[in-house]
Amino acid sequence: MASTSSNETVTQREQSIVLEDVKLMYTIFADVPPKTKHLMLELHRSNHMEYLLRGLQQLAPSFCALDANRPWICYWILHSIALLGESIDAGLEDRTIDFLSRCQDPDGGYGGGPGQMPHLATTYAAVNSLITLGDEKSLSSIDRDKIYRFLLSMKDPNGAFRMHDAGEMDVRACYTAISVASVLNILDDELVRDVGNYILSCQTYEGGISGEPGSEAHGGYTFCGLATMILINEVDRLDLATLLDWVVFRQGMEGGFQGRTNKLVDGCYSFWQGGIFALLQRFHTIIGESMTLLDAGQANCADSPQATGESDESDISDGEESLDRTSSGDEACVIQQGARIISKGDGACFFQPGVNFGNVDCKSIDGLAEREPLFNSIALQRYLLLCSQDPGGGLKDKPRKGRDYYHTCYCLSGLSVCQHCWSKDEDSSPLPGAVLGPYFNLLEPINPIHNVVLERYREAQEFFARS
């Protein structure tokens, strides 16, 4: 147990406990033989599938509290299954389509369950679920004309969207509305009008984006705001330099991401924060000149192997990375992938935030991701596999927390982002060194803007382009 002080805040005490838990896991991992390391880094695919399929067919009575979130549960489970490269049988697929059809409001949009009022969040979840199922029956069940009218009815005169009739107005509403309209091929000028102004008003002094003007920068809202601005072709209006600076420093000592400044690590932010880097890397041709912030003057880890040209992708292996050690007082400073791993001398290693921009020049890159990712992808994979994975199936926030479908979905989404962020382009298979643990761990690539598996997204694009 971590020592505590009467002067510590609740968050500081909780952070100490988390660090002790993660340190223990990493110490155990450091001390076991290579074969055991290999086993510890395995993604427990069959256990995850069993957990997911059980939830899609029958939920425990305790889930009644999520009665207004049933399309979300479908999405979290179906997307997780798709990321694992699996699918559900025809009978279960038909029942899922039928259920989601009953959630579709006669006037457009999807509610949290049959007979419930339409809501932008559950509309996003239902549409993504049906795209993930992917066949013609699933896609043709979506009434695009009525959804368009529903989206338009949710639009506020200031340009933002409300989550539901007379509901809250925030960046999340803007993202879900614009994402749905874009993927269904119904996005037009009327829906886009003044959305960018609202998103811009939510970028804070820290660089991240808040849910509404005047609030605190948050990982989920930053992802939603950035994705929305990319979809409406206004991303160049954001201050991308400060946004990138903010998100880089949300990767903590544990290797995972926190959602806000001075908050605890949480496995779900492996997507909400890690996905921001995927957006910046994959869509830099849209972002254009704003990405020239990544020049040599931005380097903050000039002593790393990447800054001196001493490292390549072969330096990364199954949890036993090739590491250069330097001295830093009574600590060993381990440099890996342009970031620092601080070793306390007892076998436990922690990640120190910081990204090396010394050898990155986006204007000269034709292959989109022909460079190292802008975050420590190996450290994040290690956190997800060792600290967020439940051996019995499912993934979770952090040690001492329980598994759930939400965290399973977004931890797996973040793991996919990590694995594919080194790839030359979205159709290239990652090199083995980019996948921590056995290559068997490799998940399906996603379209990071909509967070659906890439193949399903492309099928939906083709379907809605001709219908």
Image (spheres, rainbow, N blue to C red):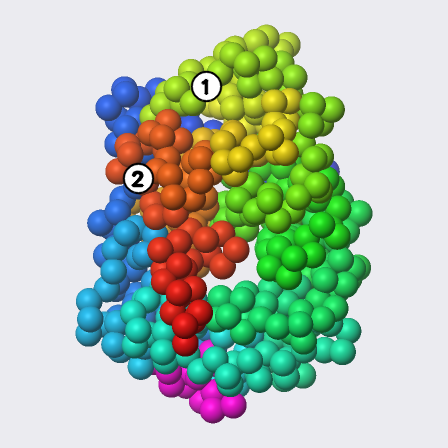
Structural crowding at the residue carrying mark 1, measured as other residues with C-alpha within 10 Å and reported as few (<14), some (14–19) or many (≥20): few
Instruction: Name the side, left or right, on which 146 lies relative to 31.
Output: right
Number of marks present in the image shown: 2
Check residue 72 for magenta coloring: no
Question: What span is in magenta?
Answer: 99-115
Any mark on residue 441, and which? 2
Q: Position of residue 377 (x, y in %)?
A: 48, 34
Disc 1 residue type? Asp
**379 lies above or below 84:** above
Furthest toward the bottom, the residue is: 106
Q: What distance separates the C-alpha of mark 1 from that of mark 2?
A: 22 Å
Instruction: Name the side, left or right, on which 170 lies relative to 466.
Output: right
What main secondary structure does the magenta stretch of the protein show?
A: loop
- Residue 142 seen by the camera: yes
Q: Of circles 1 and 2, which is in front?
A: 1
184 vs 159, nearest the viewer: 184
Any mark on residue 419, and which? none
Kindly identify the residue that appears in the image at 62 percent across and 72 percent down: 188
- Residue 400 seen by the camera: no
Kindly identify the residue that appears in the image at 29 percent across and 34 percent down: 439
Residue beneath disc 1? 312
Secondary structure under the numbered disc 2 in the rendered image: helix
Instruction: Name the side, left or right, on which 116 lies relative to 52.
Output: right
Secondary structure under the numbered disc 1 in the rendered image: loop
360 vs 212, nearest the viewer: 360
**155 lies above or below 445:** below
Q: Which part of the image, by quadrant, shows the C terminus?
A: bottom left
Q: Position of residue 441 (x, y in %)?
A: 30, 39
Kindly identify the residue that appears in the image at 68 percent across and 53 percent down: 235
Kindly identify the residue that appears in the image at 47 percent across and 91 percent down: 106
